[in-house]
Amino acid sequence: MASHTATSGPPQCFVLLDGGVPAAVATLEHHDLDARPDLTPWLANLVVDPAFRGRGHAIRLVQHTEAACRAAGLARFYLNTESAVPLYARLGWTEIGTAPHYDHTVTIMVRELG
């Protein structure tokens, strides 16, 4: 986490606490997909501990990361997902393509912040 402590823009790490317990994490990265080095920055590493799922923590972290991008003056940012397209689409993200990622294909999405 020490390498993700920029005061504005990437890289940053966000940890969501639930009752004082780390329940979820997300990062804002310069790059997250080798197949698309032209796209930056990225919402990455969004993980919610299974014991804390179903409480809206993923949504809160996405919204917090969006706020951090706005505060840094960023107009858009990207993510890749293998299975959560419907969640991100509900939050205003748009599919822009697919790309290989290790041994599978991921969907690339963009969130315009303007």
Image (cartoon, rainbow, N blue to C red):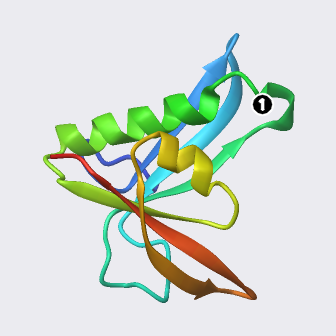
- 88 and 15: which is toward the camera: 88
- 91 and 17: which is toward the camera: 91
Picture coordinates of residue 59 (x, y %)?
A: 54, 33
Task: Using the image, determine if residue 44 lies above or below residue 32.
Answer: above
Picture coordinates of residue 85 (x, y %)?
A: 59, 56
- State how many labels appear: 1
Q: Residue at x 37, y 56 (%)?
A: 11
Callout 1 amino acid: Arg
> Is any atom of residue 1 visible in this view?
no
**Which residue lies most toward the top here?**
19
Q: Quadrant of residue 50?
A: top right
Q: Secondary structure at mark 1?
A: loop
**Which residue lies most toward the right here?**
51
Q: Is residue 113 left or right of residue 52?
A: left
> Is any atom of residue 27 visible in this view?
yes
Task: Using the image, determine if residue 5 lies above or below residue 76.
Answer: above
Q: Residue at x 65, y 54 (%)?
A: 84
Q: Which residue is mark 1?
A: 53
Picture coordinates of residue 17 (x, y %)?
A: 63, 21
Q: Residue at x 13, y 47 (%)?
A: 73
Picture coordinates of residue 80 (x, y %)?
A: 53, 67
- 17 and 6: which is toward the camera: 17
Q: Is residue 90 left or right of residue 18?
A: left
Q: Residue at x 71, y 29 (%)?
A: 23
